Image (cartoon, rainbow, N blue to C red):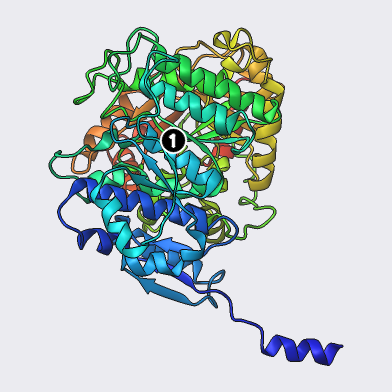
Amino acid sequence: MVLLMACLSVFAAPPEPLVYFDLQACLAGLPNDSVLRYDVAKFVSSLQGVVNRERPRLAVRFLNGDSATGPVQLDDYWLGVMRQDWLKDRVVENEADLGRLIQRFRGDCVGVVLWDPKVLATSNVAATICGVESWLPVRAGSTFETLLRQYWPDYPVKLSLVDRFDGHESGSVKCDAYLWAKRTYLDTGRCHPTLMAYFIDAYTQVPDQPGFNYHDLANATLANHDYYIAQRAFFFDLGVWADEPSVDDPKQAPGTDRKTLMTLLKAQYERNGGSGFTTVGGFIPWNLKYTNSGPAGGKHDPVATEWEYAAILSAHNAIMDADAIGLSCMTNASAWRFFPMQPRYKQNPKPEPQKLEEKIYVLIYMGDYDSAAWLSRHIPLVWDDPDRGSLPIAWAFNPNLCDRAPYVFDYVYRTKSKNDWFIGGDSGAGYLNPTLLTGDRLGSGLPDALDLWVKHNQAYYDRFDYRITGFVINGFHGDMPQRVQEAYAKFSPDGVGTCLGFAKPVVNGTPFLRVVSDIYPRLGRLDVTAKEMVASAKGDKPRFLIYRWILQRPSTMKQVFELLKAQYAKEEWVFCDPYTFFDLYRRSLD
């Protein structure tokens, strides 16, 4: 038998090649037609989600970015990391022709769903259908529909969404489409019980709109769809305000979008029975919709709109994986989610306690990494910086992002220096408003979820050896009551930084401290940054200051530190690791 098995292994089929499709080159080779390029990108990302359901079979080459040494092709960068170990023996076959790509995966193409260009929300409904049914999305009556016939002549139309919705149910054609999808796929249990997708619908472009270049296409977040399609997530794009109609559906009654959003989130809660938090990928498309920024035409500013959205999620046991504009695009998550992580990761050993002196102690919170897209895209720039390791940094990598970007966590833990420390960001293992886990909860009717939040965080914090949360955000919803502090003390026992007030500075041995300032260093004017920090450091010593830096590099931090020491030496600035910082702060309160 042993000999037979050995002989069979000789003739075993080699592993299936990984297809690496150059989507950037494919799109560049198409006519300068924004609608066609959009439709091709949507189709490829959807196909990727379908074929990567069980294992990594298709990756795309699309995303440009920056590294410490200059511009970088991010998909090449991360594929290189994968091939150092996990995929080192996997054959990678390059492809750039859409027709050949379709033929390669013809067995996975079972049909199409036609979405209605007159009801742009149906582009998202089609994404939900693709995830559940594996029917690929096609814009009805489009150039792409004709082109696809060349590559797939006999494709069957499994469902048409054209002229299906008239606004009779909700007073909004847009919302009727989502409510139909809710009944058909969410209520019936066919969608993922703890994953949803908030990505802008086809409002990003319409026929005859000029342009739609690479940058626009990246910010359309079509490349993000594959991960959510692979896992059968429910897609939506809805406004959050009760006092105005949605700017993309101005005929609806004010608040119709918001009511529909809360209906979807309540259905999702009922789907999972309150057993866990739902992760909602994506973000408010504030530059195009729902705010007073740019062409949107809304009444509310972007930050307020973000906070209102966060509040609605929080009241329905949902957290945000916040793919916000600028770094919103993320490729290949459906493939790279299979990266084999370790069961546990360890931080550097805790430092020995330091002597408390009359100095200014500083903790640099490096954020905001509450989005897997932001994290994955920015690592080549910040982590490969030659000055990383020269000073202690608290990297606020929300640990729940490992679900979509496991390779990032493995990479940074394997390559961390003695001065790299990992802490939770806003507001732990997921972005929400913690005070909305208790009480009336915006009238959602959901029971208290604070204990569930503790359990949720403990699982992620234990896996990555986290004991500190650097920034708890709470939007419009007040200071942190002692009961919420007690909850954070259970999973973040060594310290909590907040953007809000709190009942007591120490609860059950855990110190709480408010972040003093957001700092936005300007290259070429770092002396101004140093002065801003000095201005916020006045007062008695010892003094403890948490500065929140967003998307900054270690080299910038080092330059600012040197300016502080050279120009303000008398202040005796000490940049600390997070454990030393919070330990000294707690002892200063005794």
Quarter holding the N terminus?
bottom right
| Residue 404 at x, y percent in the picture | 52, 48
Give the residue drawn at x 32%, y 38%.
Answer: 564
Q: Amino acid at mark 1?
A: Val
| Residue 72 at x, y percent in the picture | 30, 61
Q: Is residue 197 visible?
A: yes
Give the residue drawn at x 53%, y 12%.
Answer: 479
Q: Nearer the viewer, residue 43 or 109?
A: 109
Residue bearing mark 1: 125
Residue positioned most to the right: 1
Give the residue drawn at x 63%, y 47%.
Answer: 464
Image height of 261 relative to 370, above or below: above
Q: Nearer the viewer, residue 123 or 166?
A: 166
| Residue 553 at x, y percent in the picture | 35, 48
Image height of 171 relative to 46, above or below: above
Quarter holding the C terminus?
top right
Image height of 589 relative to 42, above or below: above
| Residue 255 at x, y percent in the picture | 39, 11
Q: Nearer the viewer, residue 468 or 525?
A: 468
What secondary structure is marked by label 1? Answer: helix
Give the image quarter of residue 303: top left
Give the image quarter of residue 278: top right
Q: Is residue 317 visible?
A: no
Give the residue drawn at x 84%, y 88%.
Answer: 2
Q: Is residue 180 left or right of residue 242?
A: right
Q: Is residue 106 left or right of residue 441?
A: left
Give the image quarter of residue 250: top left
